[in-house]
Amino acid sequence: MKNDFLKYQAQTSPYPLGLEISHASGSYIYDTNGKTYLDFVAGVSAVSVGHSNPKVLQAIKEQIDKYLHVMVYGEYAQGPAVELTRLLAANLPDPLEQTYLVNSGTEAIDGAIKLARRATGRTQIIAAKNAYHGNTFGALSLMDFEERVAPFRPVIGDISHIGFNNFEDLTSITEQTAGVVLETIQGGAGFIQPQNGWLNAVRERCNEVGALLILDEIQPGFGRTGKLFGFENYDVIPDVVVMGKGMGGGMPIGAFTASRNHMQLLSDNPKMGHITTFGGHPVIAAAALATLTQILESSLMNEALKKEQLFRKLLKHKLITEIRGKGLMLAAIVNTGAVANDAILTAQNEGLILFWLLFEEKAIRITPPLTISNEEIEKGCLILLKVLDKIATN
């Protein structure tokens, strides 16, 4: 299978890990050779309630027996999508009320950019340095990492950048700014949290100049930081919240939510100002509804904070300089990029799945399913510490 994978499936990097997957359940992935891997990555924060979660699978099976795709998004009232958006509205602060369902987080970012320009009549979009919001042209255009952007120029124009946690840069947000797009916690940059009330200052500045604040919750969202959405940790309410990854419990989905007044702007002048064929797909919406319901009705969010403390207690090693992040969105920062790379690859051989971050080469991603047990955390941390011991002695 690996040979065909490399021959017929377009790749994202020259050296994919290439595990041949047989099945997955809970916190574990199994390859075709029968080897078991404890998963500390959860499909890059996507498998929020564990692999093959029984409630998610049941929702999928029940919906499959009713109907699959019947019409492009927004034309027919379909139960799973209606129930999902209603439950989101009930658990988001005012005025975040209407949700546009799409197919991925990066598509939701593009929709949010369009909404900001449509709502304000302005064109300038401001993003953060070292940000990552996805790879569609709109999302890619927000990135300031020239190595990744240059091969695809020209990208969309009138994009400016500010430093994350840089108060002086907030003067760049002006009456010409349509929207400010920020990750609530910067992911690819190394799981960097807003500090010293900076996110509140951004909110105030947007209010002053009439710009929309768009918060990217694609990674922090759906319980990973101990709250349903990461922005709740910082006492800030965005004008637009963007979702993805953990929203679907392992199924592909994204969304952006705003006030009814803002969202209605995409339905007229022009009509179908934003449209998707498969957004809100009934099977995927059913999976997302089951995922959201489980997160809300369980203790998973509170447990995420306790599990964070367990990770911080266990992951003490001379090669680990700090643990960044919040809840189960964590990164172990080691002393060099070479150590991080060696640790990730060696840990896989030892049956523990870890992963990289996009920009911070010294980071080891730790974003397991929210359902991971304390015993599994202890088991995985022991493997990582043993791997680091071997690296330290070489």
Image: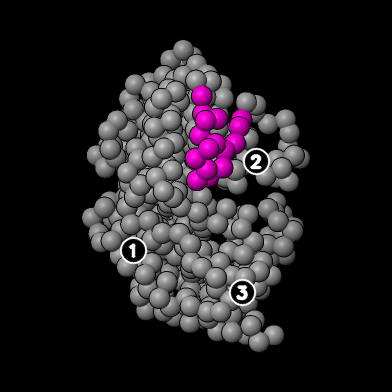
Residue 109 in view of the camera: no
**Dot 2, how many residues are within 10 Å of its Cα: few (below 14), some (14-19), or many (20+)?**
many
C-alpha distance separating marks 2 and 1? 32 Å
Vertically, is 30 above or below 160? Answer: below
Whether residue 100 appears in magenta in the rendering, the answer is no
* Contact check, label 3 and label 2, Cβ < 8 Å: no
Q: Which amino acid does label 1 sit on?
A: Leu
Residue at disc 2, secondary structure? loop
**Residue 257 numbered mark, or none:** none
Q: Mark 3 points at which residue?
A: 343
Query: Rounded to the nearest whole Å, what is the CA distance between mark 3 and mark 2?
Result: 28 Å
In-image side of 53 versus 138 (left or right) = left
Q: Nearer the viewer, mark 3 or mark 2?
A: 2
Q: In the image, what residue occupies the spot 60% across and 43% down?
A: 129
Image point (43%, 78%), residue name: 314
The amino acid type, in three-letter code, at marker 2 is Asp
- Picture coordinates of residue 147 (x, y %)? 73, 46
Extreme residue toward the top, this view: 269
Tell me the tag on residue 144. 2
At x 58% / y 64%, what residue is drawn? 363
| 169 vs 129, nearest the viewer | 169
Give the residue at mark 1: 305
Q: Earlier in the sequence, mark 2 or mark 1?
A: 2
Magenta part of the chain? 159-174
Disc 3 residue type? Answer: Ala
Q: How many marks?
A: 3
